[in-house]
Amino acid sequence: MRLLDSGPCAWGALGSVGSAAPVTLLHEATGNLVVVVVVVVVGLLVAIAAAIASRAVLSRLRGVLQLVRAIRRGSLLRDDLDVDDDAELPRSFAALTRELEHNVQSLAVERDRFDALLQAMGEGVVALDDAGHVVLANAAARTLLALAPDDVFERRLAVLSLLGIIDDAAGGTTAAAEVEVVNGDKLRRVLVRATPKPAVSGRARGGVVLVVHDVTEIRRLETLRRDFVANVSHELRTPCSVILANAETLLSGALDDGPRAQKFVEALHRNAEHLARLIADLLELSKIEAGKVTFVRVPLNLRDAAAHVVEAIEPRARAKDISIVVDVDAALQIEGDPKALDQVLINLIDNAVKYTCAGGHVRVSAQRVDNAVRLWIEDDGPGVEPKHKERLFERFYRVDSGRSRDVGGTGLGLAIVKHLVEAMDGEVGVEDALPHGTRFWVQLRLFAAARRPGSAAVDAVTAISPMSPR
């Protein structure tokens, strides 16, 4: 073997290798220890940095959380928040929240303003969604559609037959319908317009808006206008036709026939008088309605005024054997216009005489009511049916057209009375007399001096009851 042939050099090499091995191991162990120390130190530094960073992040998160809690309780005051001045996120969040709160408050103000305007409107407004459910309705809509507290709006719309125009509007077409609404004992006519509402959020249909108008008064005035045109045409045509026919008869040779000519001329005169009265009443009513008549306010003795009118009408009453009694206290004084009061009394007392049967009675009486005086003109004629009372003061309205024309009325007297009384800040009405007949009443202001307690006028006034049943 070659090992046996080795000399001293071989043994020296082996000793060198044996001494180098522990040194290498020592160096490796030292290097590993350094690495461990470095790793530990770096780990500690990282942990410390992470702790510091997490504390900073948690502090900011706490600030944001505090801000959110403040928002939830409705407090956005800076003093309530423990947020550092350099915390950009919380400060931005707070600024954004304050701006949002300002916008919400502005919207609330606009909503309240819109709601106040909506509730104050005289027209009814109803909004329906795309499913046909009512989402908004103001007070006027509930009143005009006579909606009871326990009624459902959708059911009420169906009862009033409004679903047709709602469907039309839901399809994109504006529609309208006029319906009659019964509210207690009152009948109201309302015009309902249905308008499509723009769709939102990608929906195919956006719902419907209903606007409800009360057209009761408009329709009443339209009826009055039509009746007025028809009545005035008839009233003018009748005397004009009689005048024309009699004039033609006279021109055809009746002038030479003395007795017949006299009758024709009397008919001409009678119808010409009726035509003149009609035109005069129309002009008077037109001036009163236009405010072209000047009224004065002076103290008027009611008994003297009634007696003066009765004296003028007495001859016609005697011709029908009708007695007129004036039962008015001499101390009663009212405040009004002399000519207007005279015309009111003439119309009412003359009407009572006209429509009272022969041998009947007419009574004029008065009574103080607080600071006013109520005057009654009562007859024992056939009376007025309840259905006519509401329209009795309309122009040309007649309870019995044939009988009214026979007695020579123009159909304007009561309309003039109503306007004159209202111009003197009074009231006028009609009621039944018992056991039969009609009683018109006029209420006018008591003279100002007579209203003061202790005045002679007040002390002298005694209550006069209306005519007792006969």
Image (spheres, rainbow, N blue to C red):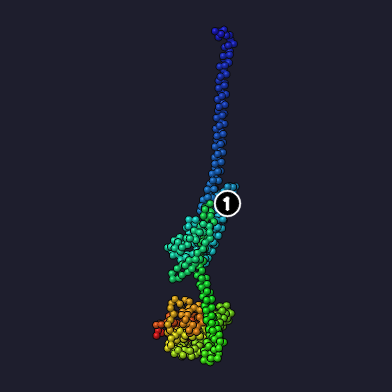
Q: What element carries label 1?
A: helix
Figure check: 25 above or below 438: above
List x then y, in percent, for residue 238: 52, 81
Q: Which residue is drawn at 51% across and 73% down?
A: 223
Query: Quick one: 120 or 395, which is closer to the camera?
Result: 395
The answer to whether residue 462 is visible is: no
Q: Residue at x 55, y 57 (%)?
A: 107
* Residue at the spot of label 1: 96
Figure check: 29 above or below 200: above
- Quadrant position of the N terminus in the picture: top right
The answer to whether residue 57 is visible is: yes
List x then y, in percent, for residue 205: 51, 55
Query: Quick one: 277 or 183, which is closer to the camera?
Result: 277
Amino acid beneath label 1: Leu
Is residue 93 left or right of 133 when viewed as pictured?
right
Figure check: 53 above or below 187: above
Query: Quick one: 403 or 257, which is closer to the camera?
Result: 257
Near mark 1 (Cα within 10 A), the count class, few <14, some 14-19 or many ≥20, is few
